[in-house]
Image: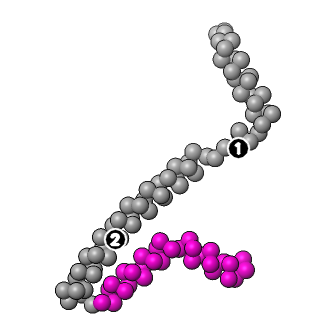
Amino acid sequence: MKHTNPLFAALFLAAFVLLLVAPEFALAASPFTSAATQLKSDASTIFQIVCFIGIMAVGVLCMLGRINKLWLVGCLFGIVLIFGSEQIITWIRGAAGV
C-alpha cells in the first residue's frame, strides 16, 4: 500500500475544513459561466466592428444609387434589434409586469 505525503494530507484536510466553515468558497462561479460571459463579450466587440463596416458599405451603395434606401433602414433596424435585444426584453417584461 502506498503512503500519502503528510503535507498533501494536511493541505487536503485544511481545504476540507475551510469548505465546511465557509461554504461560500465551494459555491464559486462555474468556470464555464465565466468563459461563456467572456466569449459573449468578445463576440459582441467583433460583431460591432463588422456591423459598423457593413453599415458603411450599405450607406455607400445607397449614395451611389446601387441599392434602395430601404436596405439601409432595414440594416439599421436589424442591428438595433440584435444589439438591443436584452434591453428590449427587459422593457417588455417590465411593461407586462412579469
Q: Image height check: is 83 above or below 24?
A: below
Q: Main secondary structure of the magenta part?
A: helix
Q: Residue at x 80, y 33 (%)?
A: 21
Res. 73 in view: yes
Residue 83 magenta-drawn? yes
Q: Which residues are magenta?
A: 69-98
Secondary element at tag 2? helix
The residue under label 1 is which amino acid type?
Leu
In front of the other: 12 or 72: 72
Q: Image height check: is 8 above or below 29?
A: above
Q: Quadrant of residue 62?
A: bottom left
Q: Quadrant of residue 65?
A: bottom left
For the C terminus, which image quadrant?
bottom right
Which disc number belongs to residue 52? 2
Q: Residue at x 47, y 58 (%)?
A: 41
Q: Label 1, on which residue?
A: 27
User: Does the CB distance between marks 1 and 2 fall below 8 Å?
Assistant: no
Q: Position of residue 51 (x, y in %)?
A: 35, 71
Label whose residue precedes the other's in the sequence (1 or 2)? 1
Label 1 – label 2 distance at C-alpha: 40 Å
For the N terminus, which image quadrant?
top right
